[in-house]
Amino acid sequence: AKRWDGIVDKLIWLAVSGAVGFLAAQIVR
């Protein structure tokens, strides 16, 4: 199960960064 940690972390990072980018785009516009 250890080998999945990197994948999970990357998915979480992508989700968080994507949400932040989306919110930033809404605020800027």
Image (cartoon, rainbow, N blue to C red):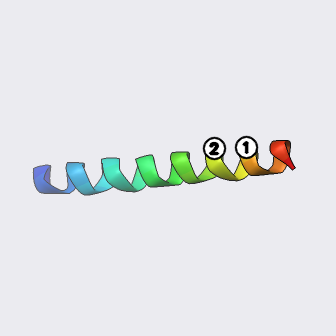
Residue 24: which numbered mark, if any? 1
Figure check: 7 above or below 5: below
- In the rendered image, residue 3, in percent from the top left (x then y), is placed at 12, 55
Whether residues under marks 2 and 1 lie with C-beta atoms below 8 angstroms apart, the answer is yes
Residue 9: which numbered mark, if any? none
Between the C-alphas of marks 2 and 1, the distance is 6 Å
Seen at 64% across and 49% down, the residue is: 21
- In the rendered image, residue 16, in percent from the top left (x then y), is placed at 53, 46
| Nearer-the-camera pick, 14 or 28 | 28
Q: In the visual, does 23 lie left or right of 26?
A: left
Q: In the visual, does 16 lie left or right of 29?
A: left
Element type where label 1 sits in the image = helix
Seen at 32% across and 47% down, the residue is: 9
Q: In the visual, does 27 lie left or right of 22?
A: right
Seen at 74% across and 46% down, the residue is: 23
Q: Quadrant of the N terminus?
A: bottom left
Q: Residues within 10 Å of mark 1 (few under 14, many from 20)?
A: few
- In the rendered image, residue 4, in percent from the top left (x then y), is placed at 20, 56
Residue with the most extreme right position? 29
Amino acid marked by disc 1: Ala
Residue 20: which numbered mark, if any? 2
| Nearer-the-camera pick, 28 or 22 | 28
Amino acid marked by disc 2: Val
